[in-house]
Amino acid sequence: MLENLTKQTSIFISNLLERYPSVELRDLYKFLYHAFHGADHAVTDYAKAVAWFDREWAEISPDDNLPLLEDAYIDGVTPVIYRINLARAKRNGMNPTGINSEFMRTAEAFPGGFKYSRGELHDQFIRCWGTLPELSRAVIKTFSPDEYHDLTLLAEKTDWPAMHHSEAFRKLYNPHYRLVLDPGNLK
């Protein structure tokens, strides 16, 4: 399992670095967190999650320079889940209610029948994060060991929570997305 985890994580990270060459370690943590945890951390209060979506949808500008869907999973290691880019969805004239409904369903349904439970996926997330130093020579050349150590200590002290994107990532990539299990439900 660890060999597959390391190999597939390396591919996942390589793809992220290709798509987002200025990604910071905190952003990598967030993307890995999504792969192993889905969207449930973002829906602790249904009414607030709906208001957050409605506010974000109203504020974003349509953009056709983004892919509509991006893989947000580690092949064979985590459940198949996607990021839907809201700016592209808005450009495509997609129904925001349908997007938000699938996001809410995803938060509740994750991991959606996958071979591991939420608790087992959380444990694998921590294991995966621990493999990053092994990948650093081959994949993660932009992150320092000190940066990795500091972020790991912060995560350990706070029980491995979800984190926000870095300020630099938000400014450069302006991310607006939701996680969904089944893009076919985006009506």
Image (cartoon, rainbow, N blue to C red):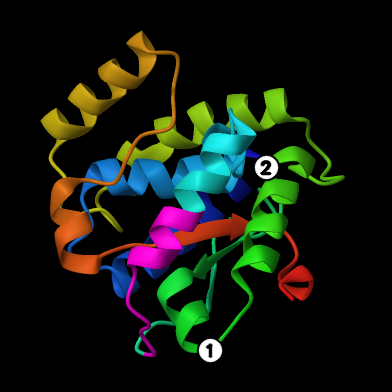
**C-alpha distance separating marks 1 and 2:** 24 Å
Q: Which residue is mark 2?
A: 107
Residue 166 x %, y %: 21, 45
Q: Nearer the viewer, residue 181 or 99?
A: 99
In the image, farthest residue toward the top = 157
Alpha-carbon neighbours of circle 2 within 10 Å: few (<14), some, or many (≥20)?
many
Residue at 74%, 76% in the rendered image: 187
Residue 13 x %, y %: 40, 58
Q: Nearer the viewer, residue 134 or 50?
A: 50
Q: Which residue is mark 1?
A: 92
Q: Are circles 1 and 2 on residues that touch, CB within 8 Å?
A: no
Residue at 34%, 9% in the rendered image: 157
Residue 152 x %, y %: 30, 24
Q: Is 58 within the magenta?
A: yes
Start and end of the magenta stretch? 54-64
Q: Is residue 162 above or below residue 144?
A: above
Alpha-carbon neighbours of circle 1 within 10 Å: few (<14), some, or many (≥20)?
few
Residue 107, can we see it? yes
Residue at 47%, 63% in the rendered image: 11
SS type, badge 1: loop
Badge number at residue 145: none
The N terminus - image quarter: top right
Kind of residue sitting beneath label 1: Asn
